[in-house]
Image: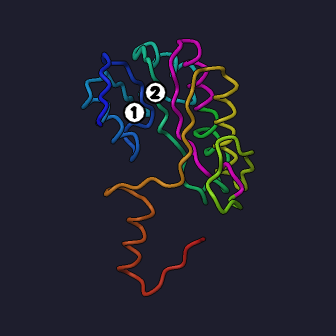
């Protein structure tokens, strides 16, 4: 049984639309006939309320999908402010604007909001306990979205993979070609 849902085209504002996740999402939404506005960082600075307000005014979105993230986990320890700006402040600004316009917000987060001690998948309501700057910045972004009161969906993922760009799988393949042995964290 295959269920097909037909709906009229909707308007999407995709932040981070040129990244690994965002570019595939934009292409999929466009292939389904939706109106997708995916500004560059220069066109819409998600940490700046004025820039976000202008972007929302131009896009008039039904949905806001935040694919942008500071993902350099190790670097976040040395550049806490930059990680916080992208992972906490930007989602807060986007959520406030989504609330004002009545748009649904989808935000991609991470399993790094947890302590990493579980041996089974974390249930949805499991308490968060980030152990590093990256996790704390993402947890702060989630909290800001909830506090905004906007309708939202938080998606926590552990890894993103693609046949292009920088990701764990391609890094391991490259290192496997260059080195006799590879050490990675558990």
Res 75 quadrant in image: bottom right
- The Cα atoms of the two marked residues, 2 and 1, are separated by 6 Å
Where residue 38 sits: x, y (%)?
Answer: 37, 29
Tell me the element at label 2: loop
The range drawn in magenta is 91-115
Q: Residue at x 50, y 29 (%)?
A: 45
Res 170 quadrant in image: bottom left
> Is there a contact, CB below 8 Å, between mark 2 and mark 1?
yes
In the rendered view of the protein, which quadrant contains the C terminus?
bottom right
List the residue tagged with mark 2. Answer: 44
When the figure is inspected, residue 167 is found, relative to residue 2, above or below; the finding is below
When the figure is inspected, residue 99 is found, relative to residue 3, above or below; the finding is above
List the residue tagged with mark 1. Answer: 40
Q: Is residue 104 magenta?
A: yes
Where residue 124 sits: x, y (%)?
Answer: 64, 42
Q: Is residue 157 magenta?
A: no
């Amino acid at each position: 049984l295959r269920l097909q849902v037909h709906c009229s085209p909707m308007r999407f504002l995709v932040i981070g639309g040129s990244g690994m996740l965002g570019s595939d999402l934009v292409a999929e939404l466009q292939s389904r006939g939706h109106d997708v506005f995916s500004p560059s960082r220069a066109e819409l600075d998600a940490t700046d309320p004025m820039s976000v307000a202008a972007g929302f005014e131009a896009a008039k979105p039904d949905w806001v999908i935040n694919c942008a993230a500071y993902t350099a986990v190790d670097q976040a320890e040395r550049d806490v402010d930059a990680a916080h700006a992208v992972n906490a402040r930007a989602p807060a600004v986007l959520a406030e604007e989504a609330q004002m316009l009545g748009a649904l917000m989808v935000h991609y987060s991470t399993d790094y909001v947890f302590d990493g001690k579980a041996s089974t998948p974390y249930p949805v309501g499991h308490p968060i306990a980030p152990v590093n700057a990256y996790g704390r910045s993402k947890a702060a972004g989630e909290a800001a979205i909830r506090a905004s009161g906007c309708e939202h969906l938080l998606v926590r993922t552990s890894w993103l993979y693609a046949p292009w760009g920088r990701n764990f799988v391609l890094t391991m393949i490259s290192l496997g070609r260059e080195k006799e042995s590879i050490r990675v964290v558990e």
